[in-house]
């Protein structure tokens, strides 16, 4: 009887590799279902300072061209409003211009309306003036007739203090009973069973770390973000994934678990007087140009980014694209390509001309794990039993921090709706969606073309 109880307890043990958005959200949802959870993080502190989610802020929006994400995001927004998030969500609204010709934005508008979101349409210059504070000059102008929609403001969205949100969730996960251990780089997935014997499939028994420590569990969940493709390659659990190569620059890409791409962001330090004027602007999310911008945060810093196809970093031709960050390369890991500094400068002059004259106070390459169709990867490895992947956030997972772990927990328990299991499968064919990414193609990161301090000064880009 005791042995049977011990076996039952073991089947509810889980090791999660990665303490980012997928890892921590999944940990909390599994703990709430009675699992014993250990979370292993490669970085020396948790949350990892170079994780994509550990940032000043992230957009929280329901405006998606895919109705599934619209509804799931509306559920997340309801959760963000709860006291447990300690006010780190700011509902300033999300403004999406349509004049730049993004089909994605038009479909997002239709889905928001169908979902019952509180929308203000922009059909005239008078409508536009209601979106932004009167003392903030913008480069937006409505050239449309009264009958044509040139943009919309979704009042039920905004931004979250992403770094603080991860810290809050980390404390909740620990308080619920999880072990969260930093400085644990996984070097091996422990398995048993004969790979050559089809009657004896491989089963996960845990993981081994580079320091020799082992952690045993019935299920191992790989939630390593942009480090996932390289980790899969090193662990020797590759498999033929869905879709086609996203880039000629990475022939070793494991399509099934994603592709690490560097996405660019920059910041501007405002004066207190400037911050007071820009405090109540909405998120600007322009899928036609790829540019998105935030209101100033508590430190009077404005962040802007480019939602595009990104950059690849391959130290060798045989390696999967791997993040290059402040933890791997020091301050040099924060530099972005000069071409993107110039693009940011031009975009600023179009959106907020006044801010286009200010220097950039900082830059960063934010490393995503992208799937070829921008759907997440949530599902079991096709060969190794008990090895579950929760990854490929594709630049839009953070807003679901409160509820994305529920999908992973459902996948573990075999409760994920069939249509969602198919959508997120590692072995799926590419799902057909309207792409949110426009503009420049994916390309290699050229270190000799990264910006320096002079490039960030006003008037030099």
Image (tube, rainbow, N blue to C red):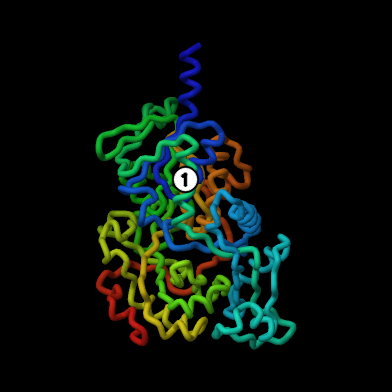
| Percent of width and height locating residue 1 | 50, 11
Would residue 354 be seen by someone viewing this image from the given angle? yes
- Residue shown at 57%/84% (left/top)? 135
Number of residues whose C-alpha sits closer than 10 Å to that of mark 1, classed few (under 14), some (14–19) or many (20 or more): many
| Percent of width and height locating residue 456 | 33, 79
| Percent of width and height locating residue 275 | 49, 76
- Residue shown at 52%/81% (left/top)? 351
22 displayed left or right of 96? left
The image quarter in which residue 210 lies: top left
Q: Quadrant of the C terminus?
A: bottom left
- In the image, residue 239 above or below residue 50: above
Number of numbered tags placed on the structure image: 1
Which residue is identified by label 1?
24
The image quarter in which residue 407 lies: top right
- Residue shown at 39%/42% (left/top)? 17
Q: Residue furthest top?
A: 1
- In the image, residue 446 above or below residue 234: below
- Residue shown at 73%/62% (left/top)? 116
Would residue 65 be seen by someone viewing this image from the given angle? no
- Asked whether 272 or 152 is in front, the reply is 272
The image quarter in which residue 33 lies: top right
* Label 1 secondary element: helix
- Asked whether 239 or 222 is in front, the reply is 222
| Percent of width and height locating residue 2 | 48, 13
- In the image, residue 119 above or below residue 31: below
């Amino acid at each position: 009887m005791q042995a049977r109880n011990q076996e039952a307890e073991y089947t509810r043990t889980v090791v999660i590799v990665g303490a980012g958005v997928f890892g921590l959200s999944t940990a909390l949802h599994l703990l709430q279902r009675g699992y014993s959870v250990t979370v292993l993080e490669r970085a020396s502190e948790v949350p990892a300072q170079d994780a994509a989610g550990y940032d000043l802020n992230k957009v929280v929006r329901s405006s998606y061209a895919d109705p599934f994400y619209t509804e799931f995001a509306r559920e997340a927004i309801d959760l963000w409003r709860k006291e447990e998030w300690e006010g780190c969500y700011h509902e300033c609204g999300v403004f999406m211009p349509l004049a730049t010709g993004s089909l994605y934005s038009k479909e997002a508008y239709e889905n928001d309306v169908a979902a019952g979101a509180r929308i203000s349409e922009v059909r005239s210059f008078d409508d536009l003036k209601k979106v932004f504070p009167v003392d903030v000059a913008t480069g937006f102008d409505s050239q449309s007739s009264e009958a044509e929609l040139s943009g919309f403001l979704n009042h039920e969205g905004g931004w979250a203090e992403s770094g603080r949100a991860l810290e809050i969730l980390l404390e909740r996960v620990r308080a619920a009973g999880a072990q969260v251990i930093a400085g644990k780089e996984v070097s091996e997935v422990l398995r048993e069973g004969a790979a050559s014997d089809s009657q004896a499939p491989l089963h996960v028994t845990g993981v081994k770390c580079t320091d020799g420590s082992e952690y045993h569990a019935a299920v191992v969940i790989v939630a390593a973000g942009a480090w996932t493709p390289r980790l899969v390659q090193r662990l020797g659990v590759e498999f033929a994934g869905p879709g086609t190569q996203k880039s000629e620059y990475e022939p070793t890409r494991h399509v099934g678990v994603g592709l690490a791409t560097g996405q660019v962001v920059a910041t501007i330090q405002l004066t207190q007087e400037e911050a007071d004027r820009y405090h109540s602007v909405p998120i600007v999310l322009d899928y036609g140009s790829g540019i998105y911008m935030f209101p100033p945060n508590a430190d009077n810093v404005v962040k802007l980014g480019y939602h595009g196809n990104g950059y690849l970093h391959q130290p060798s031709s045989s390696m999967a694209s791997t993040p290059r960050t402040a933890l791997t390369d020091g301050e040099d890991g924060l530099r972005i390509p000069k071409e993107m500094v110039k693009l940011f400068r031009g975009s600023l002059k179009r959106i907020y001309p006044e801010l286009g004259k200010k220097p950039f106070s900082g830059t960063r390459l934010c490393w995503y794990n992208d799937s070829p169709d921008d759907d997440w990867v949530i599902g079991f490895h096709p060969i190794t039993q008990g090895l579950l992947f929760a990854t490929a956030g594709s630049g839009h997972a953070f807003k679901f921090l409160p509820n994305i772990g529920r999908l992973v927990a459902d996948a573990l328990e075999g409760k994920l709706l069939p249509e969602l299991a198919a959508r997120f499968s590692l072995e799926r064919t590419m799902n057909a969606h309207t792409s949110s990414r426009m503009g420049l193609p994916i390309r290699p990161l050229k270190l000799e073309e990264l910006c320096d301090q002079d490039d960030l000064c006003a008037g030099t880009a």
